[in-house]
Image (tube, rainbow, N blue to C red):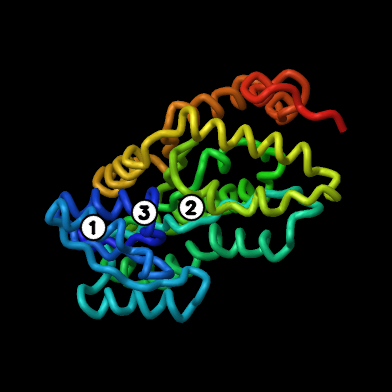
Amino acid sequence: MSIVMITGCSTGFGLETALAFARQGDTVYATMRNLAKSDPLMKRAEAEGLEINLLSLDVNDDKSVAAAIHHIQRVHGAIDVLVNNAGVGYEGSVETIDIDNARDLMETNFWRAVRTIRTALPAMRAKRAGVIINVTSVSGRVPGTAYNGWYGASKHALNALTEAMVMELDGFGVRVACIEPGFFTTEIMQNSTARRNLDGADPYAADQAWMTDFYEKSIASGGGDPVVVAAAIVNAANDPTTPVHNLVGDDAVMFVDLVQQSGTVEAWLPVGQSIVETVDGPRPPR
């Protein structure tokens, strides 16, 4: 059985992934910044008779990351499976988004993985065994979309980091893979600052509201069950033939196919008649 550490387990993918690993008998360390939000996870675990260990971990704090990982290593030795799941989803234009939100997004979605990887990897290398799974997004596989540029940039960055690590870790016995979900029913949109940031004086406000409606309607009408993503993560941990990139969800596959078929970034962008317009009505005039 494996020693598994997962970040961002209070809701969504992280919560379901913790339960999925526990069901197969692994020793699971579910981490989150605020343990007061652990009730949904622990109630589900108790109902199924599953054992899950909770750890407080702020992915944006070097000391917090080190304390959590070193605790696991003192008890068990090297972590066998590290799942970097914690993330946020702020929206806004490149020009007008609150710069603190943009920095927080990059910190949480990209640097949080860097922190956990750099702390857990030395023991994995020494043991010559381990799996690192980075939960990114289909946004990391397609050109940037309006008002989602910062989010997409963070996911592209983590995908590129993962690809580099595959080459760097060749021969060390440590596998690395990305899980790249499409639209799934999680709390990322509710936690986004998209609506709160829509100021009538912002020249992008109407257009951003239109795009945000598209995202919200896509999740409401066709968002998948996070259980599917959890299953993909567990499968990636168990299967040594798992590729570096793993799209999850029919919509994720469709978006990537559209990009590959079009051959150009311009054909993907939501201007004129587009996939966005067919779903969400005409784009507001500028």
- Asked which quadrant contains residue 51, the reply is bottom left
Q: Is residue 277 left or right of residue 232?
A: right
* Residue at figure coordinates x 51%, y 43% from the top left: 137
The x and y percentages for residue 176 are: 39, 52
The x and y percentages for residue 207 are: 77, 37
* Residue at figure coordinates x 74%, y 49% from the top left: 198
What residue is shown with label 2? 162
Q: Are marks 1 and 3 in contact (CB under 8 Å)?
A: no
What residue is shown with label 1? 43
Of mark 2 and mark 1, the one earlier in the sequence is 1
Q: Is residue 284 left or right of residue 181?
A: right
Of mark 2 and mark 3, the one earlier in the sequence is 3
What residue is shown with label 3? 14
The x and y percentages for residue 174 are: 33, 57
* Residue at figure coordinates x 56%, y 38% from the top left: 141
Q: Secondary structure at mark 1?
A: helix
Q: Which class describes the residues within 10 Å of circle 1: few (<14), some (14-19), or many (20+)?
A: few
